[in-house]
Image: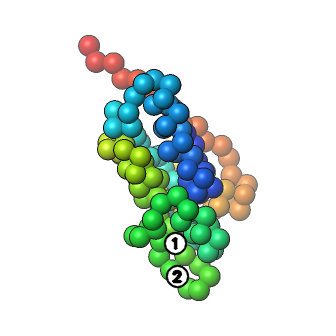
Amino acid sequence: MAVHLGWRGAANGLGPKSIRHFCAELSLQPSDLVAAIGPCIGFDKFVVRSDVVDALKKSVAPEGLVQSINETQFKVDLQGWVERQLQEIGVTQIEKIGHCTFTEADIFYSARRDSGSAGRQVSCIKLSCRT
């Protein structure tokens, strides 16, 4: 299963909701899964207003995931937020890919970096069979 979500999807619990549905359909437990959190905007570049932080706070506790820059701006660890959500529903095997789509312009498009005029990206899941 692949789920693409940004901060709005994270704030609305799309990752955990998707995993619950997936597990229910296949009679699995979240602890049976291996999750990978793909590239996204990194903590140092994901600067948001308080409304975004408030929305995200509804999904998990924000400790360690938000840093205040000033009264109106905050840095947010989006990968950390999704990781914490997955941990809270019982996913124990989580791999964070770690690339920043904002700073790594040579390999990623970014609507935020490119003022909304970004290209397109594609992700895939590959089953590796060992013989």
* Direction bottom: furthest residue: 71
* Marks 1 and 2 in Cβ contact (< 8 Å): yes
Q: Earlier in the sequence, mark 1 or mark 2?
A: 2
Give me the residue at 56% from left, 85% from top. 70
Disc 1 residue type (three-letter): Lys
Q: Which residue is mark 2?
A: 69
Q: Secondary structure at mark 1?
A: strand
- Could you tell me how many numbered marks the image carries? 2
Decide if residue 70 is on the left or right side of residue 60. right
Q: What's the distance in space between the residues labelled 1 and 2, CA to CA?
A: 7 Å
- Is residue 20 visible in the rendered structure shown here? yes
Disc 2 residue type (three-letter): Ile
Q: Which residue is mark 1?
A: 75
Q: Secondary structure at mark 2?
A: loop
Residue 111 spot, x, y in % from top left:
66, 56
Residue 67 spot, x, y in % from top left:
47, 76
- Is residue 104 visible in the rendered structure shown here? no
Give me the residue at 52% from left, 48% from top. 107
Decide if residue 30 is on the left or right side of residue 11. left
Position of 66 relative to 78 (above/below): below
| Closer to us: 32 or 66 | 32
